[in-house]
Image (spheres, rainbow, N blue to C red):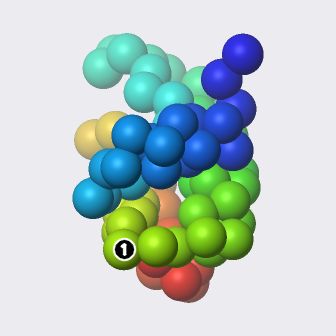
Amino acid sequence: LLTPESTVQAQKALGADIIIPLDELPPYHTDRERLVESVELTHRWEARSLREHLKDVRQQAMYCVIHGGTDVELRTKSIEYLTSLPF
């Protein structure tokens, strides 16, 4: 079972220089309601991934992943949320 925490642990064990948090990538033609749910889920997962990463940073970086598809409002909200975290 993949979790935000287990994916970070796996990338750390591999010695990754850059770690990418677990996220959900919905299909391109997803309706807005589903896209909102996906962004919210991904934000929760990214926060959990970051907490796991910060327990043992080593010489590894973690980059956030902006979501929202082609919806400018959702992408802007995603940017605002993710830049409030210590990535």
Q: Residue at x 66, y 23 (%)?
A: 2
Q: Where, by quadrant of the figure, is residue 41 drawn?
A: top right
In the picture provided, is 62 more to the left or to the right than 40? Answer: left
* Up-down relation of residue 5 to residue 78 (above or below): above
* Up-down relation of residue 51 to residue 25 (above or below): below
Q: Where, by quadrant of the figure, is residue 36 drawn?
A: top right
On the image, the x and y values in percent for residue 8 come to: 55, 46
Q: Where, by quadrant of the figure, is residue 84 drawn?
A: bottom right
- What quarter of the picture does the N terminus occupy? top right
The mark total stands at 1
In the rendered structure, which amino acid carries the disc numbered 1? Gln
On the image, the x and y values in percent for residue 71 come to: 35, 46
In the picture provided, is 31 more to the left or to the right than 15? Answer: right
- Residue tagged 1: 59
Q: Nearer the viewer, residue 15 or 50?
A: 15
> For the residue labelled by badge 1, is the local secondary structure a helix, a strand or a loop?
loop
Crowdedness of circle 1 by 10 Å Cα count: few (<14), some, many (20+)?
Answer: few
Residue 86 seen in this snapshot: yes
On the image, the x and y values in percent for residue 62 come to: 41, 64
* Up-down relation of residue 36 to residue 59 (above or below): above
Q: Residue at x 48, y 43 (%)?
A: 13
Q: Nearer the viewer, residue 7 or 66?
A: 7
On the image, the x and y values in percent for residue 57 come to: 52, 73
